[in-house]
């Protein structure tokens, strides 16, 4: 949930069955579903360079990873960032290039303001997103591991937490990644 001067935004996550975003007008109480946000909502943040708009992080890993960051304003919703991960390729014995599997997009599991930008937690790395749809990919810092959790305190403004799966974080096999503001 995120409260702005005009609206209350409520994002929801129904796992493999989808999710969405509802906008509640703070004056009239009118509730509207933002149909363009039809994926699992994992994070909401106000956009520093557009104070009347919010950013929505969406992501799910169910066989394949998919997600994006969208901007929701009073009358519009648009994608501000999506990182496409191409399908793996291989060479056949006769020299042709073939794809194996499908293309994916980064699944995003957290979002927060970071100075004049947004910091997004993807399943594969961190992303700093700025005005003009500028995006910088940031490798994960090291995680301190125990039997159930991986934790990193290396960021000054956030803590990264990974529920452990069969591989150390970050991994698509982890149960969950979390971005916890400090």
Image (tube, rainbow, N blue to C red):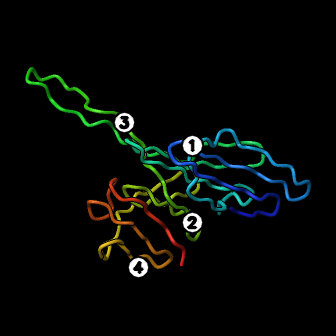
At 46% across and 79% down in the image, what residue appears?
156
Q: Horizontally, is 160 left or right of 51 in the view?
A: left
Residue placed under numbered mark 1 in the picture: 18
- Distance Cα–Cα, label 2 vs label 1: 22 Å
Mark 4 nearby-residue class (10 Å; few <14, some 14–19, many ≥20): some
Quadrant location of residue 164?
Answer: bottom left
Residue placed under numbered mark 3 in the picture: 103
Quadrant location of residue 88?
Answer: top left
**In the rendered image, which quarter contains the N terminus?**
bottom right
Question: Which is closer to the viewer, label 3 or label 1?
Answer: 1
Q: Earlier in the sequence, mark 2 or mark 3?
A: 3
Quadrant location of residue 94?
Answer: top left
Question: Which is closer to the viewer, label 1 or label 4?
Answer: 1
Q: Earlier in the sequence, mark 4 or mark 2?
A: 2
Q: Earlier in the sequence, mark 3 or mark 1?
A: 1
- Distance Cα–Cα, label 1 vs label 4: 31 Å
Residue 150: image tag: none
- Distance Cα–Cα, label 3 vs label 1: 19 Å
């Amino acid at each position: 949930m995120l409260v702005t001067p005009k609206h209350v935004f409520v994002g929801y996550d129904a796992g493999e069955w989808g999710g969405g975003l509802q906008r509640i007008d703070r004056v009239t109480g009118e509730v509207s579903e933002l149909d363009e946000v039809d994926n699992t909502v994992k994070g909401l943040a106000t956009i520093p360079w557009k104070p009347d708009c919010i950013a929505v992080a969406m992501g799910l890993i169910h066989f394949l990873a998919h997600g994006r960051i969208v901007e929701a304003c009073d009358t519009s919703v648009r994608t501000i960032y999506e990182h496409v991960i191409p399908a793996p390729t291989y060479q056949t014995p006769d020299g042709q290039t073939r794809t194996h599997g499908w293309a994916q997009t980064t699944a995003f599991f957290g979002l927060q303001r970071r100075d004049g930008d947004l910091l997004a937690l993807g399943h594969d790395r961190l992303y700093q997103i700025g005005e003009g749809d500028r995006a910088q990919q940031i490798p994960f810092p090291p995680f301190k591991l125990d039997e159930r959790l991986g934790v990193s305190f290396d960021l000054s403004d956030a803590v990264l937490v990974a529920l452990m799966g069969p591989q150390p974080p970050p991994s698509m096999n982890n149960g969950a990644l979390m971005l916890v503001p400090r």
